[in-house]
């Protein structure tokens, strides 16, 4: 899994590219990026499936912000980003949310 951050010099934003590799997607047909930046709406940010079977999307987020997020595969399987900047307890059971710091 990977997160790539590109801080823009001309604007107070960071372009963040999220990538979920094929191995982590486990044959999913659809993956959504769900987090505080889209009010945890499972339909708001659909990731694009690449030819190699991985999924990707890019968001513009404010510099200096922090966001909790997770990947949702096929509307049922939650997947964490191994390369997140941190982890915090989620609202359900023993689950943890990933943290992105910009």
Image (spheres, rainbow, N blue to C red):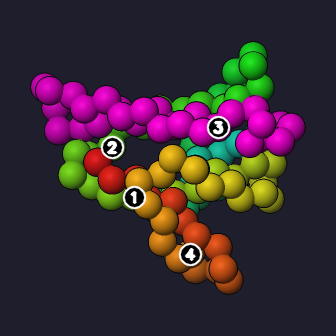
Q: Which residue is disc 4 drawn over? A: 90
Q: Nearer the viewer, mark 2 or mark 4?
A: 4
Question: What secondary structure is marked by label 4?
Answer: loop
x, y percent for residue 68: 46, 61
Question: What secondary structure is marked by label 1?
Answer: strand
* Mark 3 or mark 4: whose residue is earlier in sequence: 3
* Mark 3 or mark 1: whose residue is earlier in sequence: 3
| Viewer-proximal residue among 85 and 54 | 85
Residue at mark 3 to residue at mark 1: CA–CA distance: 18 Å
* Mark 2 or mark 3: whose residue is earlier in sequence: 3
Residue at mark 3 to residue at mark 4: CA–CA distance: 20 Å
Relative to 82, is 79 on the left or the right? right
Residue span colored magenta: 1-29
Q: Is residue 36 visible?
A: no
Q: Nearer the viewer, mark 3 or mark 1?
A: 3
Q: Nearer the viewer, mark 2 or mark 3?
A: 3
* Mark 4 or mark 1: whose residue is earlier in sequence: 1
Q: Answer yes or no: do the residues labelled 4 and 1 have beta carbons within 8 Å?
A: no
Q: Answer yes or no: do the residues labelled 3 and 4 have beta carbons within 8 Å?
A: no
Q: Classify 10 Å Cα crowding around label 4: few (below 14), some (14-19), many (20 and above).
A: few
Q: Which mark is residue 67?
A: 1
Residue at mark 1 to residue at mark 2: CA–CA distance: 9 Å
75 to 97, vertically: above or below: above
Q: Which mark is residue 20?
A: 3
Question: Is residue 9 shown in magenta?
Answer: yes
Residue at mark 2 to residue at mark 4: CA–CA distance: 22 Å
* Mark 2 or mark 4: whose residue is earlier in sequence: 2
- Taking the spot 83% from the left edge, 42% from the top edge, the residue there is 26
* Mark 1 or mark 2: whose residue is earlier in sequence: 2
Question: What secondary structure is marked by label 3?
Answer: strand
Residue at mark 4 to residue at mark 1: CA–CA distance: 13 Å
């Amino acid at each position: 899994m990977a997160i790539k951050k590109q801080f823009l010099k001309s604007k107070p934003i960071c372009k963040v590219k999220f990538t979920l590799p094929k191995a982590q997607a486990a044959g999913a047909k659809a993956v959504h990026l769900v987090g505080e930046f889209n009010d945890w709406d499972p339909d708001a940010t659909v990731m694009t499936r690449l030819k190699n079977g991985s999924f990707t999307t890019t968001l513009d987020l404010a510099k200096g912000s922090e966001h909790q997020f997770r990947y949702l595969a096929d509307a049922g399987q939650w997947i964490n980003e191994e390369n997140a900047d941190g982890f915090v307890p989620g609202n359900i059971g023993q689950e943890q949310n990933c943290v992105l710091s910009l």
